[in-house]
Image (cartoon, helix red, strand yellow):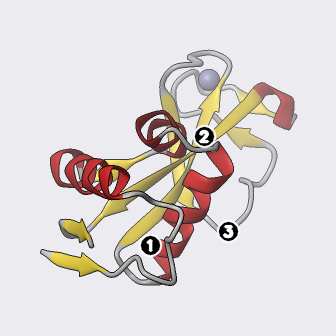
Amino acid sequence: MASFITKGRLDLLSDRQKAELSKHIQALATAMPHQLAVLLGIEYSEALAILTLLEAEGLCELKLLIYHNCEPDVPTGAIPFGKGFPDLPWVCPLCESSVENYNDLSFDIMAHFNQKIEFV
Ligand SMILES: [Zn+2]
């Protein structure tokens, strides 16, 4: 298990939030910014900043999840975060339609952790 020293880097987290975050990552090995925002009672942007920092430390990999409006609750694809948005036209693997407009897609971010982390 990796220990992540929060002092000077994630000073916004209280001891209770550090414990919650450690528990969540150990249980699920994934995290989405909106989950962390609810879990820790922080803003979405702060949750995304935490995940970006952890990726920069090599502790997780961020993926951009792609949703098509044919199945709004099921991600149809995932590409490495930081590559930008998918090229259009984009063929949806679920309904096989060719998507010409970003308005028909929605996006979310998922972090995959390659090890358990204890925030100290
Ligand atoms: Zn589709």
Q: Secondary structure at mark 2?
A: strand
46 vs 52: above or below = above
Q: Secondary structure at mark 1?
A: helix
29 vs 99: above or below = below
Residue closer to the observer: 65 or 96: 65
- Dot 1 corresponds to which residue? 54
Tell me which label, 2 or 3, sits earlier in the chain: 2
Residue drawn where x is 77% and y is 54% of the image: 87
Image quadrant of residue 22?
bottom left
Residue closer to the observer: 110 or 5: 5
- Dot 2 corresponds to which residue? 66
On the question of residue 100 being in view, the answer is no
Report crowding for label 1: few under 14, some 14 to 19, many 20 or more residues within 10 A (C-alpha).
some
Tell me which label, 3 or 1, sits earlier in the chain: 1
Residue drawn where x is 26% and y is 46% of the image: 24
Type of residue at label 3? Lys
Disc 2 within 8 angstroms of ligand 1 (CB): no
How far separated are the C-alphas under marks 3 and 1?
18 Å
- Dot 3 corresponds to which residue? 83
